[in-house]
Amino acid sequence: MRKIPAQELERIGTKLLDAAGSPHEESRLVTEMLVRSSLMGHDSHGVLRFVEYVNHMQAGQLEPGGPFEVIEDNPCFAIADGHRSWGLLTARKAMELAMNKARQHGTGTVVIRNSPHIGRLGEYPVMAASSAMIGLVMVNSYGSQDMVAPWGGINPRLSANPISWAAPTGNEWPFMVDITTSVVPEGKVRVALHAGKQLPEGCLIDHEGNPTTDPAALYGPKGGAILPLGGIVGHKGYGLNLVIELLAGVLSGAGCRGQKKTHTGNGVFLQAIDIAHFIPVEQFVSSVQEMITHIKSSRKAPGVEEILIPGELEYRTQKTRSAEGVPVSDGTWEQLLEPATKLGISI
């Protein structure tokens, strides 16, 4: 394990993506977003993805430099086509469009088709929260390998299908919920694999349906599966997963699990709500502050030092890692060196 300054990781990422064929400014923006994910502690959607994105470019699954096309535009909603360009930048533009609609009409909804992986979902609703709005994003993954078992099933038939909300709090950090509808995202299984660590119990089953903590079980020749969110009430995560299939996959026209696809990608649903159209922003923030105070006044369970609000931990982790550097496991570092060597660059 090594700790690398964020600026150095941004230099490395930009250099890798440039060498793989991405326009420099796009490389820089994408790398900045990935490093920010690592700074916040979401390593599964951080620098780990440099290698994946290089591989996707080389395989033709990701085509940087493409247009962001609005194919249907109405006062409160729009449909956008990402043309398999950078999913992270496509989602960013789509949220900006949703926010512009919300400023005029109170709410704005944008769905995206033909978008590669869009990275950490929390990146986008926080854009809305930073502008006194509430943001919502959900994503399905179509045409890719099934990783998540349905409730009561053994064979993987679903994606992790994340969902994220954010809202202003009046603090330095926004309220932010960023979760998958599976117990863990596939990226965190990969982080554990690279670090040579086991996963907590209740995350995975092997190909015969037996519980396992070994991340390698997901990637074996027969393949295991990630379990839906909820443990003994996993039907709740399973149901939420399917809601995202409908809104992000079917409604966007991108597609959903089980449909025959010639390529992979994300169906994305983004929404912004302008608070000022409903109540004064100051009233909203005051209510949130009262709620936070009430929640934190609870007696703490044994071993718990502090009750945190969603979004607070990411803010603290970002401050710590900005000062001390981003932890990068030896396995992830070796993964970064491989494409650099193939591309003939030094990192």
Image: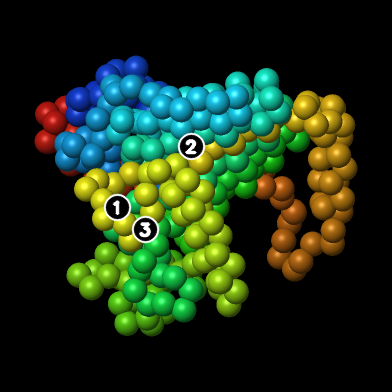
Q: CA distance from mark 3 to mark 2?
A: 17 Å
Q: Earlier in the sequence, mark 3 or mark 2?
A: 2
Q: CA distance from mark 1 to mark 3?
A: 7 Å
Q: CA distance from mark 2 to mark 1?
A: 18 Å
Q: Earlier in the sequence, mark 2 or mark 1?
A: 2
Q: Quadrant of the C terminus?
A: top left
Mark 3, Cα crowd under 10 Å, few <14 / some 14-19 / many 20+, is: many
The residue drawn where x is 58% and y is 77% is: 232
Residue type at numbered disc 1: Gly
Residue type at numbered disc 2: Val
Coloring scheme used: rainbow
Q: Position of residue 129 (x, y in %)?
A: 66, 31
Mark 1, Cα crowd under 10 Å, few <14 / some 14-19 / many 20+, is: some
Tell me if 15 is positioned left or right of 161 in this view: left
Which residue has dot 3 on it? 257
Which residue has dot 1 on it? 143
Q: Which disc is residue 111 wearing?
A: 2
The residue drawn where x is 32% and y is 67% is: 218
In the displayed structure, 13 sits above or below 250; it is: above
